[in-house]
């Protein structure tokens, strides 16, 4: 027992406890959320502020990706300037390719150049590069279809801006599309892109291979094969399934028919525990979004994937970190814009936007 300056008895243990409590209070004040988790709305606000404050530092491809998706869930004109810039670049690159297709060897040269520049940093990239190298000009055809469909989304697919559209569609129709999209070897390493290309071609009116592609995918990845799939193959399967739904929505512009995609949604519902355990935030977030696109906003899968994001959120980095803790803004843009969408899904989606580009 000790005496304080006014003669009262003090206890050292009580003093230590008081200092501990004070330190805890200071920690709460500094961290802001140590003992009071953020709401989903606050998380969304923090992620958006983080990305939009540093928006100009992102690569233009990431700017387009982010702005396009935020526009489609908000309809906010704030996101039009970067999309207007994207539209101008898109028209310029397409005009060059459409003009070049008049030359007999142009597409072969473009495909060779794209394959040569294809990244080889990871094993997945090396497998994809090898696979694409076995399909002649498909690497260029796929890229051409994607950009033409992007022009369609933004009201830019017309002969005034893009003379030679018919030539491009004829070129695409002349490629071995059915063989490529239904090939087990292609699906095995390129599932999401298979779904994307299927719907790009359908949207452009080139060919409708939706049924054939879906059946080939389901035959390659039946549920009974699941136990034999590696983690990488399982992730490829789930990511591919999400993109059948997402691509059918014209990439978050319209709702989809839950009956048409029952084969996807029922599988997700049954296997959600494994999906969240063995995939990563990018993938299980798209699983949740798939239910939202189908209008199943009250489905338990939506709540469970939102809860998983809440647990994954890093309040210091103000973002959903990567699988191994990475917080790089550009690398995390895809993951975090998806998180914004899942956590703050709107009552309606906004198509487009329709852009005004002068030739």
Image: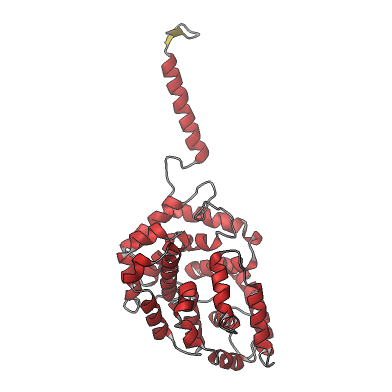
Counting from the top left corner in percent of width and height, residue 115 is at 63, 76
Residue at position x 52%, y 37% from top? 30
Residue 52 appears in the picture as rendered: yes
204 horizontally vs 55: left or right: left
Residue 252 appears in the picture as rendered: no
Is residue 92 or residue 72 the one in the foreground? 92
Counting from the top left corner in percent of width and height, residue 173 is at 53, 91
Quadrant in the rendering for residue 214: bottom left
Locate the C terminus by quadrant. Answer: bottom right
Residue at position x 61%, y 67% from top? 120
Counting from the top left corner in percent of width and height, residue 27 is at 49, 35
Residue at position x 42%, y 42% from top? 36
Position above or below: 343 against 198: above
Counting from the top left corner in percent of width and height, residue 288 is at 39, 64
Is residue 276 or residue 248 the one in the foreground? 276
Is residue 268 or residue 255 the one in the foreground? 268
Position above or below: 52 against 194: above
How does the figure colour the protein chain or chains? secondary structure
355 horizontally vs 183: left or right: right
Locate the N terminus by quadrant. Answer: top left
Residue at position x 56%, y 89% from top? 172
Position above or below: 182 against 286: below
């Amino acid at each position: 027992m000790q005496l304080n300056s006014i003669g009262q008895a003090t206890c050292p243990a009580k003093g230590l406890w008081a200092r501990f409590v004070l330190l805890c209070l200071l920690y709460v004040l500094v961290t802001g959320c140590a003992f009071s988790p953020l709401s989903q709305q606050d998380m969304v606000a923090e992620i958006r502020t983080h990305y939009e404050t540093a928006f100009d530092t992102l690569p233009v491809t990431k700017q387009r990706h982010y702005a396009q998706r935020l526009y489609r869930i908000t309809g906010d004109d704030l996101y039009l300037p970067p999309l207007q810039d994207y539209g101008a670049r898109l028209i310029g690159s397409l005009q060059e390719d459409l003009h070049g297709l008049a030359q007999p060897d142009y597409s072969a040269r473009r495909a060779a150049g794209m394959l040569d520049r294809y990244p080889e940093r990871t094993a997945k990239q090396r497998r994809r590069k090898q696979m694409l190298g076995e399909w002649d000009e498909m690497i260029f055809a796929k890229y051409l279809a994607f950009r033409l469909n992007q022009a369609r989304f933004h009201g830019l697919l017309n002969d005034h801006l893009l003379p030679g559209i018919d030539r491009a569609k004829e070129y695409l129709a002349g490629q071995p599309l059915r063989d490529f999209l239904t090939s087990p070897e292609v699906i095995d390493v390129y599932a999401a892109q298979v779904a994307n290309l299927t719907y790009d071609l359908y949207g452009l009116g080139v060919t409708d291979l939706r049924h054939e592609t879906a059946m080939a995918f389901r035959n390659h990845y039946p549920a009974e094969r699941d136990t034999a799939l590696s983690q990488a193959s399982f992730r490829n399967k789930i990511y591919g399934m999400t993109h059948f739904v997402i691509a059918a929505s014209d990439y978050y512009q319209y709702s989809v028919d839950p009956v048409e995609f029952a084969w996807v949604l029922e599988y997700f519902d049954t296997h959600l525990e494994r999906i969240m355990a063995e995939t990563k935030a990018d993938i299980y977030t798209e699983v949740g979004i798939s239910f939202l696109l189908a209008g199943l906003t009250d489905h338990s899968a939506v709540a469970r994937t939102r809860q998983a994001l809440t647990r994954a959120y890093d309040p210091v980095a103000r973002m959903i970190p990567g699988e191994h803790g990475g917080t790089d803004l550009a690398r995390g843009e895809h993951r975090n814009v998806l998180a914004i969408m899942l956590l703050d899904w709107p009552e309606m989606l906004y198509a487009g936007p329709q852009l005004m580009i002068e030739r």
